Amino acid sequence: MSIEEKQKDIISEFGLFEDWMQKYEYIIELGKELPIIEERFKTDDRLIEGCQSRVWLQAEMKSGLMSFSADSDAIITKGIIALLIRVLNDESAETVVKSDLYFINDIGLHEHLSPTRSNGLASMVKKIKMAALTELTQK
């Protein structure tokens, strides 16, 4: 499934909910399905700076594709990083770096997050793309 298709699926899923309380509940549920980072990777260098809560991200190449796992101490944040991983997991590093994550605006996520959470979301995207860029430059 392409990034395009994954984003369209998410937009469609969020369209099923009538209000943002239901959407937040769905985000929390998505966080429960997050590929959880191994405890040994919960280190300071994997913490995403700029997030209100603690969020760890592990990125690695597996069979030529990016593989991400993460964890957070906040349930909403865990759901947000789960959305990003759902879209960007199992993609080439180049695809991750060049991706336009339009689903974030299309589902209204930015406008329904507090300013600090919104900054955290931007930091998550940046950390994921930087991990992919690092993989590209190591070739």
Image (cartoon, rainbow, N blue to C red):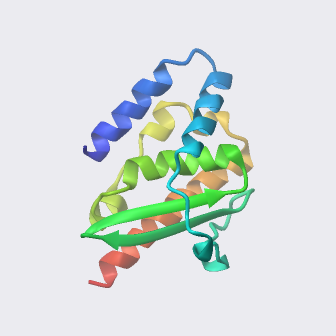
Q: Position of residue 97 (x, y in %)?
A: 36, 63
* Residue shown at 66% from the left, 68% from the top: 49
Indicate the quadrant where residue 90 lies: bottom left
20 up-or-down from 122: above or below: above
Q: Nearer the viewer, residue 117 or 13?
A: 13
- 77 in relation to 95, above or below: above
Q: Please state if 77 lies on the left or on the right of 53 as rendered.
A: left
Q: Pinpoint residue 118: horizontal percent, then vertical percent.
A: 65, 47
Give the left or right position of residue 123, taking residue 93 as reference.
right
Residue 45 x %, y %: 61, 79
Residue reaching furthest to the bottom: 138
Depth check, front residue: 115 or 25: 25
Q: Residue at x 48, y 18 (%)?
A: 16
Quarter of the N terminus within the rendering: top left
Q: Quadrant of the C terminus?
A: bottom left
Residue at horizontal 56 percent and vertical 68 percent from the top: 38
Residue drawn at x 63%, y 34% as measured from the top left: 111
